[in-house]
Every structure is written in C-alpha cells, then in structure tokens.
Image: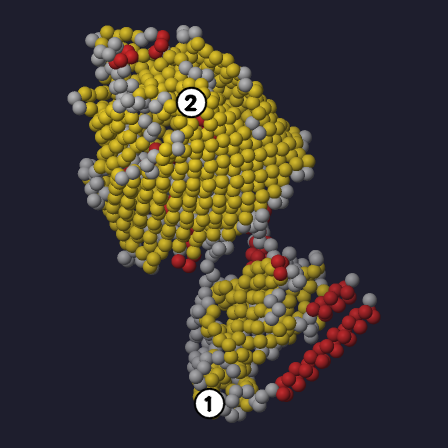
Amino acid sequence: MINSRIILIFLFLTDSIAYAQKNQSELTPIDKVVYVCTYQLDYLRDSKDQESRRSEKMVLFIGKSVSKFQSLNAYIKDTINWNRKTDDMALMLAKIKGKSSRFAFNIYKNYPEGEISTTDRIYSDNFIYNEPLQLLDWEMTDDTTTYLGYHCQKATTYYAGRNYEAWFTSEIPISEGPYKFNGLPGLIVKIKDTRNHYSFELISFVKSNEQYSLFFGKGII
Amino acid sequence: MQRRAKVILCDFWKFKILSVLVFMLLNAVAFSQNKISGNVIDNTGAPLEGIYILVSPVNGIHILAFAISDEKGAFSLSHHSTLDSLKIKTKSLNFAEQLFLISNKSQNIHFVLEPKIMELKEVKVLATPISRYGDTLDYTVNAFADEKDRVLADVLKKMPGIDVGSDGKIYYQGEAIQKYYIDGLDLLEGKYSIANDNLPYEAVSSVQVLENHQPMRILQDIVPTDKASLNIKLKKNVTTTGTAMAGSGFLPLLWNVNITPMLFAKKLQLIVSYQTNNMGDDVSRSLKTLTLEDLSDYMENQIDAKDELLNIKTIQSPSFSKNRYLFNNVHLLNFNYLVKLSKDYELRVNASYLNDYQQESGKVETTYFLPNDTLQLNEYIHNNFFFNSLQTNFTLKKNTKKIYLKNSLQIKAYWDSQNGLIESGDSKIVQNLGNPYQSVSNKLRFIATIEKQLIEFSSVANYSNALQQLQVFPGQFESILNNNEPYDENIQQANLYGFFTNNSLGISKGKNRLKMITKLGFQYQNQRLNTFLNKINNGVVEELDLNFQNHLNWLKTKYYVQTEFVHQTKHLKTSILLPISLLNYTISDTELQRGQKLNPVLFEPRLSLQYTINAFWKLGGRASYSNNFGSIRQINYGAIFQNLHLMQIKDTPLPESQSQNYALKVDYSNPLSSVFAGMNYQHTFTRNNLIFQNQLQADGSNYLSAIQQKNQQVSHVLSGRISKYISSTKTTIALESSYNTTLGEEIINSIFSEIDSRILSFQPKLNIRILDWMSMEYKMLNSTFTRSINQQKQPNVNQQKHLLDLSIYPHEGHYLGVFAEYYVTTYSEKKTENYFLDFIYRFSFSKKKIDIEAKWYNVLNHQNYSSFYLSSFMLGQTTYQLRPSQFMLSIKFVL
C-alpha cells in the first residue's frame, strides 16, 4: 500500500524524496509573521473542461527566515480548530460553514534551512516530503508593467512539466511567491502556466508587525 | 507491482536526461555572456548575505540579470546584453541601495552598504462589498456607508437590489421582505422601521438577505418559499446603542425630541423609544406593520384593522413628503422587549402609545359634471384630527426543528376624534366625528412532528367594536330629509361589533421530493351593524325612519379543506394548492325585513413554480383563481349618512368577484459585479357581479348605489428594474420602469362605459461620489396617466418629480446638505409646479458620536401647493397649505 503511494508521488514530482507518515495534529511555532500576501488562485478542476474553472484564495505568510503557503480557508479552519477549547461547537461550525477548500497542502520554504517541506493529505493519511529550496531557473524578459501600483517585470521558468510566466516586483525585494515559486529578485505578483490551468494573482500585501507566530502543523484536519 | 514501478522510473529518468541535454544545448547556442562577480559588505566590513544584485540598462528599469549574495557576501552573475553601458545596483530590505554605472565587460564589483530599513508599500484587499453563500447574500455595511449616513436606513437604500420605500418598507428585488431579524431574533415583527430609522449603522457589521427563507424551522426544506428576509448582523455580542436627539426651532416655536435606547444581547433584546415633535415628522409610521407572512395571515391580519364607518370631508393631500405639509403635535411611546427563556421559548412584549394632533387647511374648487349642467363649488376647509391609541402585543414563541409554537395576544384601543370646518361663501359647515375602536385578538399556531408526519394546528379569535358618530351643523341633504327646508343638525351613529374565529388542522406527509399537505378548517363570523340618523331642529330631536336605519345581522360560516402538493428538486420548486370551501352567508336586517342567503361552493386553485437556472438567474411563475365575496361593509339596506356629501345605500346582492391571476418573473443577481435586475409581468382578469354608480344631486351631494350588472376588468402590468453598484467610486445606479394597463367597466353619468386606463412610469436613481468631498443622490419619477372612456381619449395627466440631495464635506467633521425637490403636474394645457429647497449644516465631533445640526426647511418659503383631481364626474383643484420656512437647531448623539 505504502509503496504504491510513493510511486504516485514520484510521478508528479522531480528530484525529490518522499515518505508517508501518519502524524498527530500539532502546531509548533517556527517563526514570526512579517508580511502576509493573499493570492487569488484560478484553476481548472478538469483540464479538459473549460466550465470547471474554480477559484480560491490562498495565503503566503512571510516570516523572518521561513515562509508558509496554504489555502486561506484551510488557514481559517486551522485557527478555529486550534481555538477549539474556547469556542463552543455551534459557534465553531458556524464560522467554518462555507469555508471549504480543495487544497490541504502547506508549503514551508526554508524549513528546514535550504529545503522546502510540503505537508499534504491523501484521503485520511497525512504525509510530508522535502525538496531543495532552489528549484527554479528563471529567464528574464524585457516586458514590464504596473500591477497594484507596483512596477513589475516578467520572467519565465519551467517546473514540474509546465512552462510558467511570472510577474515579479523588485519594489518588494523578497525572493518569494505563491506555491513553491521563489528565486526572483522580488515578490511574484502574478504567475500562471502557459496552458492556463493554474494562475495565481496577488490581491493584497500587508505588513504584520511580527505579532503572530508562523506555525508548522503536522497532520492538520 | 515492483516491475511496473521500475519501468515507469526508467522512462521518467530518460525524459529528465533528455530535457537536461536539450536545455544545455540551447544554452550553448545562446548569446555570448559577460560575467560580473564581486562581494557585498556593510560599513563595518562584515559580509552581507541575501542581498540582491540587479543589472539593468542605463535608461531602462527592467532587470537583465540578477544574483543573491551568499554567506561570504560573494555573488556572481552572467548576462547577455550587448549594450555599451549598464547599471548595477543592490536591493535589500535592510540596507540602502548602492548603484554603479559600468561598462559592459566582465568585472568584479565591490559594494559597501549603509543600513536602512526599506518601507514597503502595502496593498490592502478591499472586502467584497457583496458576497453570496448559498441562499444568503451578505452586504458589508462599511462598503456602502458615506460620511453623512447615520442610521441603518441611510445605508440600506444604497445597497443594490434593496430599496426602502417612503413608508419605511424594505424591498429586495422588487418584493417586500418577509422578516426583519436582528441577530437572528424577531423583536419587532413587521414594525421594523423603528430599528431601521434609529439603529446607528456603525453597530452593524453586515446586512444579510436570506433568499427563499422559511421562518418556521420545522418547515424548512418542506414548504418552499420564494420570499426573502433580512437579518441585521451586529458587530458585537452585546450592543447598547440607539440615538438621542433634541431640537428646537421657530416660526412658530418648534421642537423635535427622539430618545431611542437599544440593547441587544444574546438572550435579550430591548428597544424603547420616546418621540415627540411638532415639525411635521409623522412618527406614527413606525407603528405600521410592513411585512406580510403569507396569504392566510394577510386575511387574518385584516380582521383587527380599524373600522372607519363615517368620515369628515378631507382635502386630498399632496403627493410629496409629508413633512412639507403636516401640521402636527405628536407624542409616541414605544416599548419592545424580547427575552429568550429556557427550553427554546421566546417571550416578546410590544406596546405603543400614540397621542397625535394633526391639522390641515386648504381651498378646494370643484367642478361637477352633471348630465345637464356643471356645478361649481368653492370651499375653504380646516380640519383637526386627534389620534389617541394604545396597542399591545404579548407573544410566546418556540421555533425549533421539532416544534413551532406561537401564541400572540393583541389588544388595541383607539380614542380618536376629528372635527372639520368648511366655509363656502356665507355658509359655514361644522363636522364633529368620534371614531373610537377596540379590538382583542388571539392568534395561535402550533406545528409538530408526530410519527414522521407534520401536524399543524392554527386558531385565530377576535372581538372588535366600533361605536362611531358624525355630527354635522347645519343639517345636510335637505331635499331628502327635510322637504327642502334648512335645519340645524344631523347626527349619524354607527355601531359595528362582532366576533370572528378561524381554526384549522393540517397534516403533511412526505416521500423523497414530493410532499403533501392536507388542511381542514372552519371559520365563523358573527357581526352586527346598527345605525340610525337623527335630525335636530330648534332643539327637537327626531329619529329618522327605518329607511335611514340599519339593524343588520351578518353570519358567515366557512368549512374548508385544502391539499397542497410540493415538489422540490435542486433547481425547481413546484407547489400546487387545491382548496375547496363551503360557505354560508346569512345576512338579515331584522327591522327592515330584508336579507339574503348564499351557499357558494368554491374551488380556488393556486400554482407556483420557481426555477433556479444558476447562481445568477431565477425564474418564477404563479397562476391562481380566486373567488371573493364582500364583507358587512358592502351591505346596508338602510341609508347611511357617511359624510356631508355622501348618503350611501347598498341594497344589493353581496358583491362577488372572480379573478384569474397570472404572474411571471425573472430575477438576475450577481454579487460579484454588484448587478441586480429583474422583470415582472402580471395579468389579472376579474369578473364582478355588481357595478357601482354615483348619482349626483343638485346640491352637489352624491347618492352611491350599486346595480346588479356583470362587468369585468382586465389588467396587465409589466415592470422591470436594474441596479448596479460600483465599489471604486461608491456609486449606485438604478432604474425602474413599469407599464400598467387596465380595461374596466363603470357607470358614468348613468351610462355603462368602458374605461381604458394606462400608467407608464419611469424612475431612475443615482447615488454618486462626484469628488472626494462631494456626493450626490438624484431620483426622478415620471408617470404618465392616460384614460379613454368608450374609446374617447381623455387628456393625459403627467406627473414628474425630481429630488436632488447634494452632500458637501468642506472639512473633517463638517457636512453641508442641500436638498432640492421639484414637482410638476401637467393636465391638458394646465401645468402646476412646486419646488422646495432645504439646507442642513451638521458639525460632528467626538468621533462622530455627537452631531450638532442646523436645518433650514423650505428656504423659498412656498406656502401653498396646488393640485388637480380628475375623475369621471368631477374636476377638482386643491390648494393645500404647507409648512412655511422653518429653522431648527438640534443636537444628536449615539447612545
């Protein structure tokens, strides 16, 4: 059983080592949140069906050395679950209502140092795998534009079987972006694959003043 | 398993190696490269890691190549630009930028950076003003609120899809809302304008529209509904709020005081209000019930409506806002309390006391078109109205998934009276009316599940009494009552009292998507109408004979059984109602020996469909047949002197109308683009058994009678509306239009005529923030009335009104409002125009919690309003006295 799962993962990834684990639910603080970026993800559920386009909000927490990327609704659910003892069940369910997400993954960049950790779930099994942090080679282009008031430039790369076009802004000199994308001299504000199956767009960027902790969660429900 | 994995891996690696080779090849074929390397240190000589080094053209901003310094501060990059010179600079969150212009060759660069924290520009996400979760639409209040808004009603009317009428009624997609909840609780049951007009919008986080909302939890998913309700979500769990306002002004001495404290907590809600003013603000409108639960409730709700049997002659009031012409002196005390008890019970107490004195003055010039003559009458009218009433309601409710129980006890008492003075030439007519009324009602509804079946029991009982009297000096209708000789006084007395009860038991069964609801019930109504007319001359009182008296007994019983089939799928909700009723009317006047008996058997089916095409589009259709009979108010064998111009007798069979009604509607709502639109079509075909006629007498009075003659009326109404909200400029644009045509039959001047009336109306509305410090609201209503009598076209009447509300914010905390209204009515060649101007200046301090307001109403001091009234037998011109220019200073604060 476990062997077939490993094969499944191999097919989707390159240069990676994976293992499946059953872990208990646990949140440990690993950094402080400095910036919070919210991205809008538009994707095709079924690549052959243009009507299956959906969208979801994703959030990228940038800490002092680590960053965490997950679905916004999953983040809200995590927070509610974590506060479970203080809220009553009905109130909790009311807050969760309507906050479903198709994505259960959490991507931690530079945790452990020099690596990207991804936690995810297939059916009821939670697992984690690691990859090196510098995954991508970017090609700069001459295209520039303004987006959300930031001056941006286009760069392209190839990752996991797809060609991507990304817009980044050196006005935010943080080598970060949605999902596992990083390595540009500025925050990625827009990125999409050339087949239009996935697209991320930045919708907000705010400073968080290090009030909140960035948590590493094992086996979140 | 293992073998297959190996094969896959092999292929996979093959592909990888191939792609790497191709990539290297491509790179080798690529352009010549120049390599730039170096290191970055700070001003103490320590190496800096994580600094970006960017290479770009001298006259360009895009990056040609970049590198990030490592832990030793070293970096290395290569680029393939062919330009002569380049720009190379560092970029970091914590160090200042250092820039060099270099020539295009491989070289080594050494950076020394000064510490400097870089401030990043933030972009905050705009909360979507409207979002949808299934059947619930959530409007974020802050997105729609403007500086000049204070209470929830101000913000509600800007939300697209939602409209607030002048009476305070809230509409969603053109239909009145069914329930107004505050944090899920129904404190005010339909009398919600007291909350809407006094709840500060800042206490509200969002307004939710609950589409297809079934208020009775036990019926959710069983009885479909296409009605929408509103839920006001407050920001805090415990909110104490409300408004308090005190103002004073002059010409003459004016006052306006409103103290409305509110308390909302999880298990308790309280709204108390004391309002008093004499500046024309009709606060009694907050007592009006603005919701309609369902058709059966509508009938029941009319049972305790106040009976007005007689009346004084009033002047037709202008069609603009009441505060321009209402002369009043009102006190209103309102108390609303809701508490959640154990075991899911809720107790609610609502009580209100109204003491209102109103006055109206004007001149009426009437031209009567008699068969052989025209009659001109000029009158100066001055009326006083005294409204004095107490209404109380005690309701116990339990609304859970298993049980619905609601019992309401309502007690109403009115001690009203009116008097009127009419001066015409040398003559003076005085009218005194006493119109008190009392009523006690109890409404009980109980729904529970017993062995997987839903049982519903409902019972309404009501007792009401109206003992009213109209006294007129000098006596009227001399030709009929006193041999054409004048006399001193008439006194008409009318007493209507009775008892009503309606009880029913229903069972509903369901299987999969189909549900069947069967109901049986009976209704009993017993009323008595006693009237007599006295003539007084020189102190001698004479009671007029039986022709001017009524001793009418009315007995109505109804046995009914109805079955409703409800079918519900994800997209389509269908419901068919099949009611059969057996009625018995026994009407008899014991003294006049007149009466009638009817035993109709009625079948009044109703069909309704609702189809949800997708998240944005909805279709609905309704078809029904109804057969209605008149009430005791439509029969009187003895004449009644109803007002000084009208002696009426209804010696006819009980009026009966049969109507078919068809309606179709399309709704579009898109919260993402904030567009709401809809279209409605309604067609009604009615057959009546009676036709009424007015017979004008030589002295200008009317003799109203009815003849038995089948007649019909056909009407078509087509209406459409669209509204859009643009969040970036806080603009709302809306347009409503309707076309209404009615073809009916009436008796005019003793001739059976066909009347064709049409009304075309057009109503745009615009709410826009023109500049940062100025916003505007503009509304226009244009209605064109056309009429043809027997295909002869009558002159058109066109009414147009323009309302402009300009808000200027010269400085923080200051607000200047300019309010202009223009009304124009065109009838044939005659055009009457009225325009008004108001100024308001408000200064707010203490973070908008305290307002000081100076208001100047009717700046142009227009004191009179003229209007026309046209009917088939008369033309009237009314000049109504308006409130003159007034100045008012008030202080208002949020509690």
Above/below status of B427 relative to A134: above
> Residue type at mark 2?
Ile
Q: Are marks 1 and 2 on the same chain?
A: yes
Q: Residue at x 32, y 43 (%)?
A: B800
In primary-sequence order, the first of circles 1 and 2 is 1
The residue furthest left is B426
In the image, is B249 to the left or to the right of A57? left
Mark 1 neighbour density, 10 Å: few (under 14) some (14–19) many (20 or more): some
Q: Position of residue A193 (x, y in %)?
A: 60, 70
Q: Position of residue B745 (x, y in %)?
A: 42, 27
Dot label at residue B691: 2
Q: Chain of mark 1?
A: B
Which residue is identified by label 1? B85
Q: Residue at x 45, y 46 (%)?
A: B721
Q: Position of residue B139 (x, y in %)?
A: 46, 50
* Residue B359 placement: quadrant: top left
Mark 2 neighbour density, 10 Å: few (under 14) some (14–19) many (20 or more): some
Quadrant containing the N terminus of chain B in the rendered view: bottom right
> Residue type at mark 1?
Ser
Q: Chain of mark 2?
A: B
